Image (cartoon, grey):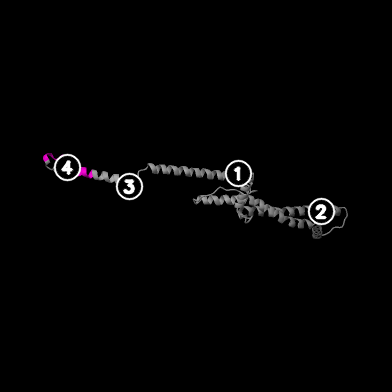
Amino acid sequence: MQSTEMHGTEEQAKKPARKKIFVSGMIQGRMLGRLATYWVIYHLVLFHSMFLYHYMQYWGETLAGAQSEPFLELYGSFASNHYSIIICAVAVFPIIFWDMMSLTHRVAGPLVRFRTAMNQLAQGETVEKIKLRDGHLLIEFQDAFNAYLDTLESSKGESGKNSLADNATRPDADELAEAILEDAVALQQMTSSSPQAMAPNGVAADS
């Protein structure tokens, strides 16, 4: 039990410290920008829906005989009475924004690591298995990628064994060249001696 805890502590100590949370403008930037847009739209719709309800009440009171007010004064009066909605929205937004940045990092961080590893593989470099941090998402991608690395490593090992076997059964180049040279010399000797062997009684054959 103690050895397991010590092993886990060593693994955590080997992990590099997290330097930054915002690692991908394409992924996190779009998500956070969409969040900010929806946040603004939501509170604008909420504020003006409340004002519309207030205006309908005001219109009913006017029809009942109450004194009317200009629209701008009515809107300013409503805003001065409900400005706390805007203050709360502005105060709470940084907390939600930071939490969403941390959440998107749990997706963008692993994707950046996978992209870096794939680029290294494309350049022929050796890539170690990826171990995501605690709390990161895409654990299924981690398992699939590490399984792919195992398959790639085993295929490289088999190809290396096959190449060694081919080299072992293949004749040496020097020996092959020497054998060819000996055959050529023997053929030349046979060719030069063949006319004398064919001439009867030691008389050279006519050409």
Q: Position of residue 34 (x, y in %)?
A: 67, 53
Query: Which comes sooner in the sequence, label 4 or label 3?
Result: 3
CA gap between label 2 and label 3 equals 100 Å
Residue furthest to the right: 65
Query: Which comes sooner in the sequence, label 1 or label 4?
Result: 1
Figure check: 100 above or below 183: below
Crowding around mark 3 (Cα neighbors within 10 Å: few <14, some 14 to 19, many 20+) is: few
Q: Which residue is label 1 attached to? A: 140
Crowding around mark 1 (Cα neighbors within 10 Å: few <14, some 14 to 19, many 20+) is: few
Give SS at disc 4: helix
Q: Nearer the viewer, residue 78 or 71?
A: 78
Task: Indicate the amino acid at tag 1.
Answer: Glu
Query: Which comes sooner in the sequence, label 1 or label 2?
Result: 2
Q: Main secondary structure of the magenta part?
A: helix
Q: Which residue is label 3 attached to? A: 174
Q: Nearer the viewer, residue 37 or 27?
A: 27
CA gap between label 4 and label 2 equals 127 Å
Mark toward the viewer: 4 or 3: 3
Task: Indicate the amino acid at tag 3.
Answer: Asp
CA gap between label 4 and label 3 equals 33 Å
In the rendered view of the protein, which quadrant contains the C terminus?
top left
Decide whether residue 82 is among the magenta residues.
no
Q: Which residues are magenta?
A: 187-201
Task: Indicate the amino acid at tag 4.
Answer: Pro
Q: Which residue is label 2 attached to? A: 54
